[in-house]
Amino acid sequence: MRIGEIAKAVGTTPRTIRYYEEIGLLPGSSARPSGGHRTYTDEDVEQLREVLRLKDLLGVSLDELRGLVADQHLRHALRGEFHAEETSPARRTAILDELERVADRQLELVARRRGQLDALEAELRDRQERIAARRDELSATPAR
Amino acid sequence: MRIGEIAKAVGTTPRTIRYYEEIGLLPGSSARPSGGHRTYTDEDVEQLREVLRLKDLLGVSLDELRGLVADQHLRHALRGEFHAEETSPARRTAILDELERVADRQLELVARRRGQLDALEAELRDRQERIAARRDELSATPAR
DNA sequence: TTGCTCCTCACGTCACGTGAGGTGGC
DNA sequence: TTGCTCCTCACGTCACGTGAGGTGGC
């Protein structure tokens, strides 16, 4: 998969992906001959999509996003290790603990944002109710 | 109220407020002698705070924000007219209609965003549940 | 008078957008 | 061979940050 395709798949531009690679946010298509085309896997697509979604919805800077990218990588690495034949049950339990911590971290960020949005939505609904109340007052006291 | 105070009150910097004035997003402190200090009212604070909140939570560009600013101004103007002595009941009804449309527009934007966040939160919770299920599987089949 | 905040340039920065000119794979 | 997408500079832009040097109000 080439850069144009992945960009389209995750809803961004080739330039943005190259820029992320440039500042070290993305690992940089491995074993690429300088000047050669970058290639991406389906896993890359999935990870990048998730990261961009968090960036958009949480409104974080690219520097803060580094932490989220690190978590995404950690998640995929742990999943791979979990499913490997030779991984012991004890190690598997430890992996699950760590995966849960990653999910908790992301959920906390999302929940905080949702709280802010909920508050705003509540205010707007409140405003609508006050408008409705005014309207009732008006129709109750007809024009004289 | 001076620019440093309003910036602190709404959680931004003087530079940002000057920039918004420069690009015409904010009206520009009226009747200010060139080189003289900008002054702001409590109403300005309230409006700017609301606008910045929408910008942050909705992640819009400054160009899109112009529409939201226009709505905020419209809202305050209509409220003033509504409470004026000489406004007829018929006009008051019309004002309520327009205020409701403004609130509807803002609610729709907020609701859309909330939907996206809800979807993300649901996925993260789902992920947590799958982790819990895996954990149950592991403890059910003890290490041999 | 002394701080403090304000003012206007004006250059710097972050996160990309946008050509300019050239190379690579179906 | 012809399009198409890719590549690397490199300059432009948007939304401000950050001094530089000077002025205004308690």
Image (cartoon, coloured by chain):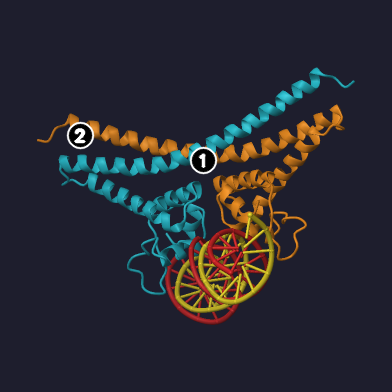
Chain colours: A orange, B cyan, C yellow, D red
Looking at the rendered image, the quarter that the N terminus of chain B falls into is: bottom left
Tell me where residue B44 appears, x and y as whole percent. 38, 55
Q: Residue furthest top?
A: B140
Q: Nearer the viewer, residue C8 or B97?
A: B97
Is residue B102 found left or right of A46 in the rendered image? left
Chain of residue at mark 2: A
D23 shown above or below B142: below
Tell me where residue A23 appears, x and y as whole percent. 68, 60
Which amino acid type is marked by label 1? Gln
B140 shown above or below D23: above
Tell me where residue B22 appears, x and y as whole percent. 42, 67
Q: Which mark is residue A138?
A: 2
Q: Nearer the viewer, residue B41 or A124?
A: A124
Chain of residue at mark 1: A
Have a look at marks 1 and 2 and say if they share a chain: yes
Looking at the rendered image, the quarter that the C terminus of chain B falls into is: top right
Q: Which mark is residue A116?
A: 1
Which amino acid type is marked by label 2? Leu
Mark 1 or 2: in front is: 1
Is residue B118 found left or right of B20 in the rendered image? right
In terms of image quadrants, where is residue B142? top right
Q: Element under label 1? A: helix
